[in-house]
Amino acid sequence: MNRASSKQITISGRNFVLEVMMFSNGCIAVVSEGEASRLGSISLSLKGESSTSRPSPIIPGRLNESPIADILTEALTTVTSGILMVSYFAEKELLGGDLKEMVDQLRNIISERVK
């Protein structure tokens, strides 16, 4: 079974690489701006059968990456179970509407992998 998915997207003229790796007990999502995959701020969440935990920043990022990693982690817990780790790297701030589009793209990738 192929556990990994990779997709390049453009949001407001900015290029991002979205990479998702699924496991039987969780998921790793890596979001990086630019053509090359990069690790950035890392946030972790653990979701049980009936509860959701709050994201925990593991590696704070530069500038404002950490809050975005936490937001992505919290948003993606609705479509994952178990351990969720999100890494987010960007050159500059991601704005509200763009962040929603990013979440939607990641949810679609994860939902397809869970089927």
Image (cartoon, rainbow, N blue to C red):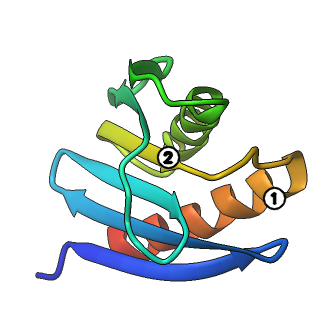
Query: Which label was assigned to residue 88?
Result: 2
Across the whole image, how many numbered discs are drawn on residues? 2
Q: Residue at x 37, y 29 (%)?
A: 44
Q: Amino acid at mark 2?
A: Tyr
Counting residues from the N terminus, which is met first, the one under dot 1 or under dot 2? 2
- Dots 1, 2 in contact, CB < 8 A: no
Residue 77 shown left or right of residue 30 in the figure: right
Q: Which residue is mark 1?
A: 98
Q: Residue at x 29, y 51 (%)?
A: 27
Task: Classify mark 1: residues with Cα within 10 Å, few (<14), some (14-19) or many (20+).
Answer: some
> Does dot 1 land on a helix, a strand or a loop?
helix
Query: With respect to residue 13, does 86 lie above or below?
Result: above
Q: Looking at the picture, tell me which residue is in the foreground, 56 or 65.
A: 65
Query: With respect to residue 56, does 43 lie above or below?
Result: below
Q: Quadrant of residue 53?
A: top left
Residue 61: % across, % down: 49, 30
Q: Residue at x 34, y 40 (%)?
A: 85
Q: Amino acid at mark 1?
A: Asp
Q: Quadrant of residue 81?
A: top left
Q: Quadrant of the C terminus?
A: bottom left
Q: CA distance from mark 1 to mark 2?
A: 14 Å
Q: Looking at the picture, tell me which residue is in the foreground, 56 or 83.
A: 56
